[in-house]
Amino acid sequence: MAKADRLERMDQRRLELEADYTADLIAALKVTAGGTWGLFDHKGDKHARAKVAPVIAALEDLAGEIDDLRERLDLEPFALHAEFMAACGPAKAHAVGEPKQAQAWLERLEA
C-alpha cells in the first residue's frame, strides 16, 4: 500500500507542476501576444533573449522536474515543453511574427 500511496503522491505532484508550467507559459504568451518579442527567439536579438531568459529558465526547470516524475511513473515525456521548444529559434522569412504565434498558442491552450 505504501508504494501505491507514493505513486499517487508523485502523480499528484506531476499534475501540479504541469498546471504551473501551463500557467507560466500562458502568462509569457500573453506578454508576447501583446507585442513584446523574444519568447520564441525568432530574431536572435540578444537583448530580447536576455529579457526572457528567466522565463525560459523557469519553464525548463519545471519541465525537467515534470519529465523526471513522468519517467519514474513510466509515462511519456512532457509534450507541451517539447512542442514549445521546437517552436523557438530562427524562423523563416515568411513565418508569422511572435505576437501572432503567441496568440495562436494561447487559443490552443485556453480552448
Image (spheres, grey):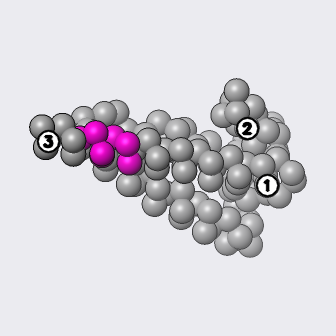
Q: Position of residue 71 (x, y in %)?
A: 27, 42
Q: Is residue 59 magenta?
A: no
Quarter that holds the N terminus: top left
Crowd rating for badge 3 (residues with CA inside 10 Å; few <14, some 14–19, many 20+): few
Quarter location, residue 5: top left
Q: Mark 3 — residue?
A: 3
Give me the residue at 62% from left, 62% from top. Answer: 55
Looking at the image, residue 2 sits to the left or right of residue 96; the answer is left
- In this picture, is 86 found above or below 49? above
Which quadrant of the rendered structure holds the C terminus? top right
In magenta, the rendered stretch is 7-13
In the displayed orientation, state which residue is furthest to the top: 111
The residue wearing badge 2 is: 106
On the rendered structure, is 38 left or right of 8? right
Q: Disc 2 on helix, strand or loop?
A: helix
What residue occupies the far right of the structure in this picture? 35
Res 78 quadrant in image: top left
Name the mark on residue 31: 1
Residue 27's x, y, as percent?
71, 52
Identify whether 87 is placed above or below 60. Answer: above
